[in-house]
Amino acid sequence: MKFEYKVQGGNFSKAGYASSDLKKILKQLNVNPAIIKRVVVALYEAEVNIVAHAYNGTITIDIDDKQVRIVLEDQGPGIPSIEQAMQKGFSTASPHVREMGFGAGMGLPNIKKNADVMNITSKVNVGTTVEIINYI
Amino acid sequence: MKINELIEKTNLKQFGTADINRDFEGGYASDLLSDVMGNAKEKNVWITMQTHKNVVAVASLKDIAAIVFSNGNTPESDTIEAANEEDVILLGTTKGTYEICGEIYQIAK
């Protein structure tokens, strides 16, 4: 099964839509609830990252009998140092985003913790691609 | 314990229309959404001062039993709308976070 979602940078009112949809789909597929919890946390954080940092993005979700593979590709500022971005507490989020309780530098570490496989590639001034795989 | 018992014992006010006849187990207090995403547990009561719509998505994704807005904070109207749609319980108190956490801890332990 394949699903695609568009994400608009800056639009927090829609943040979490894909995560919420995927949660429902995985429940219907009777996926182990503990795995659903991990997938949903990882996707939500990645979705919020596009909203908080990028101009727009596309989420592609591929589900088969072995895994959930999520690819989030955005057009945005990119990440100059992925190593730095992966550090707990490091964030480049705006004051407005921080006031909302986002941008605490916990997003990427949360994704890493909850994904079985996580890959990030990024090009400054072009965009970032995050791949998240969870085995089911 | 049920949320409706908690409302009665700690004098909480409900916003929205979600069914309050629901079990909860323990709680988590935080204003950082990623902290809640990473560390809150299913059926927790979540005590926060964040009142914007995104708290509903977080609560729904994490199967949080209810959100409690402390310190007299009240949810924005689109937060209440989203909570009604997602069946997320929204509660409020004029007590500070420390005080309401202490009360809930005593009642729920």
Image: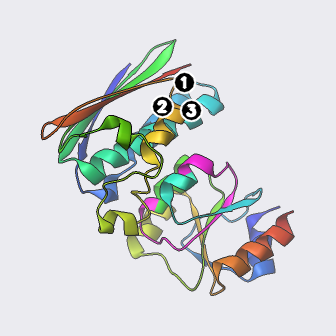
Q: Circle 3 is placed at which residue position?
A: A36
Q: CA distance from mark 2 to mark 1?
A: 6 Å
Work out whether disc 1 and disc 3 sit on a shared chain: yes
Whether pointer 3 and pointer 2 mark residues with C-beta atoms closer than 8 Å, the reply is no
Residue A28, image x and y in percent? 54, 29
**Secondary structure under the numbered disc 1 in the rendered image:** loop
Image vertical order of residue B104 relative to residue A119, above or below: below
Q: Identify which residue, A85 or A40, lies in the foreground.
A: A85
The mark closer to the camera, 1 or 3, is 3
**Which quarter of the picture shows residue B107?**
bottom right
Whether pointer 1 and pointer 3 mark residues with C-beta atoms closer than 8 Å, the reply is no
**Which amino acid type corresponds to the residue marked 1 in the rendered image?**
Leu
| Residue in the image at 45% along x and 35% along y | A22
Q: CA distance from mark 1 to mark 3?
A: 10 Å
| Residue in the image at 42% along x and 64% along y | B53
Whether pointer 2 and pointer 1 mark residues with C-beta atoms closer than 8 Å, the reply is yes
The mark found on residue B60 in the picture is none
Q: Circle 2 is placed at which residue position?
A: A25
Q: Circle 1 is placed at which residue position?
A: A29
| Residue in the image at 76% along x and 59% along y | B26
Q: Earlier in the sequence, mark 3 or mark 2?
A: 2
What is the magenta range? B37-54
Q: CA distance from mark 3 to mark 2?
A: 10 Å
Q: Identify which residue, A135 or B3, lies in the foreground.
A: A135
Chain to which the residue tagged by mark 2 belongs = A
Image vertical order of residue A11 relative to residue A120, above or below: below
The mark closer to the camera, 3 or 2, is 3
**Which amino acid type corresponds to the residue marked 3 in the rendered image?**
Ile
**Which amino acid type corresponds to the residue marked 2 in the rendered image?**
Ile
Whether residue A72 is visible, yes or no, is: no
| Residue in the image at 23% along x and 40% along y | A80
